[in-house]
Image (tube, rainbow, N blue to C red):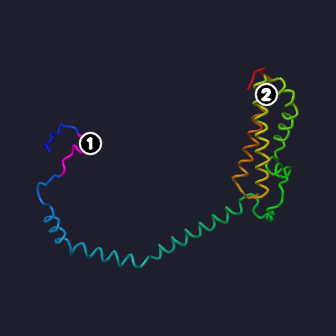
């Protein structure tokens, strides 16, 4: 291979030289330095090893404090879960939609708003353009199916926080659609 100058560019690995000889052999110097410090380095290493073999009382106290914190956190977390302390529900018990709805939608303002929007839904959907009407009905059908499936799953696993959150989000999605229909029909525009 030819020698390359500093300005030559390397585009592939093949452009690099196969072997480069060092200017000087550095191993004798490294070996001399290690041999010269051998006595100095060995003492601190031995002292550190002795210290590591016997843990200090602070280390034991720190470990005990960490275990206690984790235990308290688990205890608080388990008591804060929804359904904690409630008797276990049999797996074959079918979900009760009204019970689930009461558990998640207990705010009277929400219930009033929801009832008013549902009561006026038929007339407001009829006032929408056909394309918007189809979108609204498809969205509401999907939301109602999702609510039924989530309530059924929660009937089997009432302590599942993810299912509970998904059900609450589904209720919020339903309110968004109902509110959008209400606002769209008032403005005379489509969705």
Measuring from the top left, give residue 28's x and y in whole percent: 13, 66
Q: Quadrant of residue 134?
A: top right
Q: Which mark is residue 133?
A: 2
Does 149 sit left or right of 51 as displayed? Answer: right
Badge 1 is on which residue? Answer: 12
Front-most of residues 179 and 189: 189
Instruction: Name the residue at 79% across, 65% down.
Output: 88
Inspect the magenta stretch and tell me whether residue 103 lies in it.
Answer: no
> Would you place residue 70 above or below residue 158 in this image?
below
Residue at the spot x=67%, y=63% of the render?
A: 76
Q: Residue furthest top?
A: 188
Q: Estimate the x, y position of residue 44 in percent, counting from the top left.
A: 28, 74
Q: Quadrant of the C terminus?
A: top right
Numbered badge on residue 153: none
Q: Mark 2 or mark 1, which is nearer the start of the sequence?
A: 1
Q: Which secondary structure dominates the residues rendered in magenta?
A: loop
Residue 93 figure quarter = bottom right
Q: Which residues are magenta?
A: 10-18
Crowd around label 1: few <14 · some 14–19 · many ≥20 (10 Å): few
In percent of width and height, residue 47 lies at 32, 77
Q: Is residue 19 above or below residue 28?
A: above
* Residue 110 drawn above or below residue 164: above
Nearest to the observer: residue 112 or residue 89: 89
Horizontal side of residue 6 vs 149, given as left or right: left
Q: Is residue 28 left or right of residue 68?
A: left
Q: Circle 1 — which element?
A: loop
Name the quarter where the N terminus is drawn. top left
How many other residues sit within 10 Å of disc 2, few (<14), some (14-19) or many (≥20)? Answer: some
In front: label 1 or label 2: 1
Q: CA distance from mark 1 to mark 2?
A: 62 Å
Question: Is residue 13 one of those drawn in magenta?
Answer: yes
Residue in view at x 23 percent, y 40 percent:
10
């Amino acid at each position: 291979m030819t020698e390359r100058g500093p300005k030559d560019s390397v585009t592939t690995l093949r452009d690099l030289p196969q072997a480069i000889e060092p200017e000087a052999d550095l191993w004798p110097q490294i070996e001399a330095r290690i041999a010269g410090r051998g006595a100095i380095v060995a003492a601190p290493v031995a002292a550190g090893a002795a210290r590591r073999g016997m843990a200090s009382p602070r280390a034991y106290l720190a470990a005990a404090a960490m275990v206690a914190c984790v235990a308290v956190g688990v205890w608080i977390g388990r008591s804060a879960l929804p359904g904690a302390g409630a008797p276990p529900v049999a797996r074959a018990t079918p979900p009760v939609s009204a019970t689930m709805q009461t558990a998640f939608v207990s705010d009277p303002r929400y219930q009033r708003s929801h009832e008013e929007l549902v009561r006026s839904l038929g007339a407001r959907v009829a006032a929408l353009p056909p394309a918007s009407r189809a979108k609204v009905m498809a969205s509401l059908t999907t939301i109602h199916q999702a609510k039924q499936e989530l309530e059924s799953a929660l009937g089997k696993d009432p302590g599942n926080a993810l299912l509970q959150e998904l059900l609450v989000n589904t209720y919020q999605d339903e309110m968004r659609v109902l509110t959008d229909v209400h606002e769209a029909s008032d403005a005379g525009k489509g969705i």
